[in-house]
Amino acid sequence: MRIKSKKHREWIATLPCLLCADNTSVECAHVRYPDPRIGKPLTGTGIKPDDCFSVPLCGQHHRVQHAQGDEQQFWLTGGIDPVLVALALWAVSGDYESGMKICEAAHAA
């Protein structure tokens, strides 16, 4: 059963984009690729990942994430481990100050 949290998704959208730090058009972006480190399965068309695997991206970067084809390469190019960031955000969900610290650290990486 998929973990869903509308409240978490809405909170994610209040944070700045992980890639450009824009905070005006942020969307909740789900990380779809599998991660064997934690047993995260592959998800894709018609199968959304759990909401605990979501991060903030501006509209432009969210479109690129989906359009690029190789999501892992998208994140490698950005220098961000989105699974780690998503789980850190899930752990502090609703705490804006802590979420901002996580996003700032990811953006600086």
Image (cartoon, rainbow, N blue to C red):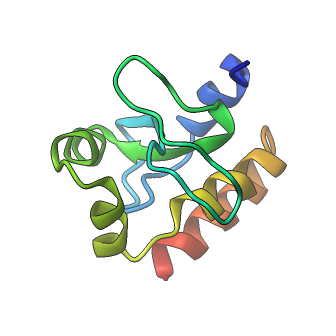
Residue 102 image point, x, y percent:
66, 65
- Say left or right for 14 vs 16: right
Q: Residue at x 68, y 52 (%)?
A: 39
Instruction: Please indicate whether residue 23 sits to the left or right of residue 102 in the image.
Output: left
Viewer-closest of 6 and 76: 76
Name the residue nearer the viewer: 96 or 51.
51
Q: Is residue 22 above or below residue 19?
A: above
Closer-to-camera residue (28/76)? 76
Query: Total label count?
Result: 0
User: Where is residue 77 shown, x and y percent of the image?
Assistant: 28, 73
**Image spot of residue 107 (x, y percent):** 47, 71
Q: Quadrant of residue 50?
A: top right
Residue 25 point in image, percent of width and height = 35, 36
| Residue placed most toward the observer, 14 or 47 | 47
Residue positioned 34% across, 24% down in the render: 45
Q: In the displayed structure, would residue 51 be above or below residue 79?
A: above
**Residue at figure coordinates x 59%, y 38% from the top left:** 12
Please identify the quadrant where the N terminus is shown: top right
Residue at the location (30% across, 41% down)? 62
